[in-house]
Amino acid sequence: GGTLVEVSRLTKIYKVRPRLLSKPRPLTAVNDVSFAIEPGGTFGLVGESGSGKTTIARIIMGAETATTGSLRIADHHFGARHDDAGDAWRHRFLQPVLQDPHGALDPAMRIGRIIDEPLRVQRPLPDEKAYRARVADLLGQVGLPPAFADRLPGALSGGQRQRVAIARALALDPKLLVLDEPVSALDVSIQAQVLNLLKDLQDRHGLTYLLISHDLAVVAFMATRIGVLYLGQFMELGGRRSVLERPAHPYTQALIAAAEPALDQAVPVSGEIPSPLDPPLGCSFHPRCHKAQARCRVEKPLLRPVGPDHWAACHFAET
Ligand code: SF4
């Protein structure tokens, strides 16, 4: 029982200037988002760019603080204020694996040094021999030979670089990995290999994952629970099978239709995502929704139960 991560009513409002000389205006990037991740599970946050998924990941990683709401990771509580002791703990407990293996790895640093750097900073080993042994072990865990320790990132393929990023993330024995678009920079043929590696490592180490992706197919492959974000709010939330097999929200239905064009079950979503500075009134999805009615333009639908362990924010979702 219990949950490892609990996000409660998280809201993040930025002050932005739409133009250089205009007055700052509030932009609600994340709007009253709540979810939990069970130990050993994978919570998949899916959404287009501008949906707020990366802001949520950054708040969980401690790179930003929430405007309101709270966050619990294991038995540590994080509020809207910085907490240095909590942050130090968080940097050992959770590690990120980010999208771009090119940008993430210093091109002048040998792979061995890239992987053992977190250890040198946070948990030093007695001597160089111990570092070499730990690097060889971590390389082995991600399916790379020990000789890779002496190479430079430029000599590696995209998939190999992402394996190195995963080895580095594992160096401090974290319990939680935040996977932010972990395969979107890779060829489709390589994506499945890296996702399978992540699944194997999760089983072997009992890891918990927060997976962020714009790609519903990636989330469908990995996640035990899924949250579908649109303009900072959950449109749908629930167990993997509920959301994928009985999608209740027109936006989720459209994402599934787009991911499996052969099924041709629903009208794919058309048009651009509106600016979060001017979110539509009523249901934020109504300008793109083929089921929209007059009510949708004035009344905002709340997330409500539509089945066991399954919620959707649509006036016309069937329960
Ligand atoms: Fe579409 Fe209306 Fe449901 Fe929003 S509330 S998703 S506009 S049907």
Image (cartoon, rainbow, N blue to C red):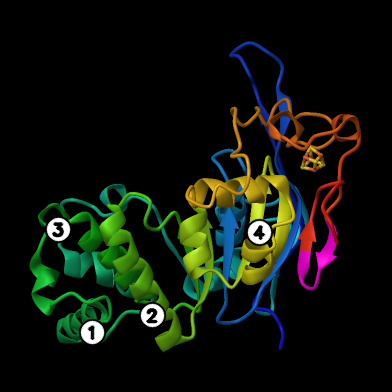
Q: Which residue is mark 3?
A: 156
Q: Earlier in the sequence, mark 1 or mark 2?
A: 1
Whether residue 189 sits left or right of residue 146 in the image: it is right
Q: Along the polypeptide, which appears first: circle 2 or circle 3?
A: 3
Question: For disc 2, does the CB lie below 8 Å from ligand 1?
Answer: no
Is residue 48 at least partly visible in the picture? yes
Q: Which residues are magenta?
A: 304-310
User: How far across and how far down the image is residue 57, in percent?
Assistant: 57, 56
Give amino acid for label 1.
Answer: Asp
Quarter placement of the N terminus: bottom right
Numbered disc 1: secondary structure? helix
User: What residue is at 62 percent from the left and 39 percent from the top?
Assistant: 267
Question: Which of the marked residues, 1 or 4, is nearer the chain's N terminus?
Answer: 1
Circle 3/circle 1 CB separation < 8 Å: no
Spatial CA distance of label 4 from label 2 is 23 Å
- Circle 4 sits in a helix, a strand or a loop, which is it? strand
Q: Provide the residue designation for mark 2.
A: 201
Q: Distance of mark 1 from mark 4, alpha carbons?
A: 35 Å
